[in-house]
Amino acid sequence: MPGGHPFLGHALQLRSRPLEFVQALRTYGDIVAFRLGPRDAYAVNHPDLIRRMLTTEAKSFAKGRMFEKGRLVARNGLFTSEGDFHLRQRRIIQPLLRRAHIQQYTVTMREIAHARVETWRDGQEIRMDRELFDVALDTVTRVLFSTRIGDHGAAAVYRSLPVLLEGLGRRAVAPIDLLDKLPTVMNYRFARALSQMRRVIEHIISEYRSRGADADADAGTADLLAALLAARDEETGEGMSDEQVYDEVVTMLIAGTETTAGALSWACYLLSRHPRIQQRLQAELEEQLGERDVVFEDLGKLRFLQQVIAETLRLHPSTWMLMRSPVADVELGGHLLPVGSTVLFSIYALQRDPSLYPRPDEFDPDRWAPERAALIHRDAYIPFGAGIRGCAGEQFARAEMAIILGVILRQFILCPGSGPPARPIVRLIPMPSAMPLIVHRRPRGPGFQEAR
Ligand code: HEM
């Protein structure tokens, strides 16, 4: 990749214009060498090669430097752990985020979305990005702890998590590690948020243990935390230590809040800018649901809603760039990736590649209609990653997005608000800039029933 600085390489470009930079990298070939400071780095751009790296060659790659920062908060949770330990954790946790459990969680998702939407007034301008961050955080918190976290504990999580997310985002793109260690106000706030979060969650875990949360889980009345405490590895029968449960709880709060909040915000924003698509979606909801509210069993039938979600996640995947590091020299696509080097791949650049998608920057949910979707390269769409490190919360996130959008669009029409067009602000996750939208209440039929 041309244009590197003699000392910093391409680090400044990656930091200052990240989305442009990863797209520029794509134009130089299937695998492109560049430099991050003194380190050699490689961008893998071709969909087949990305797929190979994430699936058949997955054992040859560790998650690498980018995830070391995540360890500051999520320690040895599913997102950041490696090797056999990761496989064991994945075996234990994945079943808790599958269909049978999701069905139960969608009740909570709907209740939270309803409670929030009830506070909106006809014609009000809403900061949709903030609103949906709160909804996503409420959802993960209630699914994890039901109501047992208490107001005091919940307030501590709500205060700490945004500080931790912001701090991790800043650290992920910082050119040197020293910045994290300076006695700055930001670093102090980060350390305080971390210890607050730790105190609250450790306290809840010990309460659950002493109240016998395992019994709840057996009785099927559990929340996700009770299920984590009761879960056993199918192969060895072993459960998790309290420390490990803590790591997994924090991982889910981190991995499951901004990701879904960002995707939901973009979906609302795009719909507000494409009124015909919004009307079609509302017509589908009416046709499929009649006068009732959206429930889990509807999700498969709401085809156009699924297309809108798919297209939003194509244009605005929650992770714009991910990294890996070869654990031994690896040959990929005829190139040698040396052990310990930094290997980058960008879902954002892949999913906006004009050689894979016609008019790649256009919001066109119909590209996911079955006859057109069949023409898209099989590996060109990976918003949830792929392989053994692919998103453990994919079904959770898809259900959450569908339920929340369903609740909003049954009741409101979304229109552009004041201010400039939204743009992604890239940290760990590209979050939208301020996104004011005006909400207009839709008339409801007399027989409309809210699902409970
Ligand atoms: C729209 C929402 C979401 C998107 C786009 C998304 C995307 C991703 C991606 C791309 C990865 C793979 C990272 C890599 O390969 O390095 C990932 C991993 C992960 N995600 Fe998600 N995610 C979302 C929501 C969630 C939610 C709601 C949860 C939890 C409830 C979650 C939990 C996780 C976990 C635990 C991992 C690590 C899996 C492992 O390494 O075994 N995610 N996610």
Image: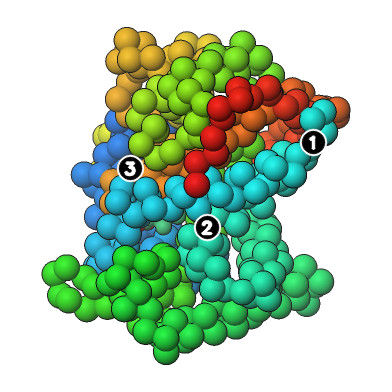
In the rendered image, the residue lying farthest to the front is 446
Mark 3 or 1, nearer chain start: 1
Q: CA distance from mark 3 to mark 1?
A: 41 Å
Helix, strand or loop at mark 3 = loop
Badge 2 marks a residue whose secondary structure is: helix
Q: Amino acid at mark 3?
A: Ala
Could you tell me which residue is drawn at 36 percent across and 25 percent down? 301
Q: Which residue is mark 3?
A: 386
Q: Is residue 452 visible?
A: yes
Question: Image height check: is 351 above or below 164?
Answer: above
> Residue 298 appears at what percent x and percent y?
39, 32
- Direction right: furthest residue: 418
**What is the basis of the colouring in this image?**
rainbow
Across and down, in percent, residue 451 comes to 50, 41
Name the residue type under label 1: Arg
Q: Are marks 2 and 1 in contact (CB under 8 Å)?
A: no
Q: Which of 296/8 is in front?
A: 296
Residue assigned mark 1: 121
Which mark is in front, 3 or 1? 1
Q: Residue at x 85, y 28 (%)?
A: 418
Where's residue 412, x and y in %?
Answer: 68, 28
State the CA–CA distance, disc 2 to disc 1: 26 Å
Pinpoint residue 362: horizontal percent, then vertical percent.
57, 16
Is 295 left or right of 184, judged from the image as shown? left
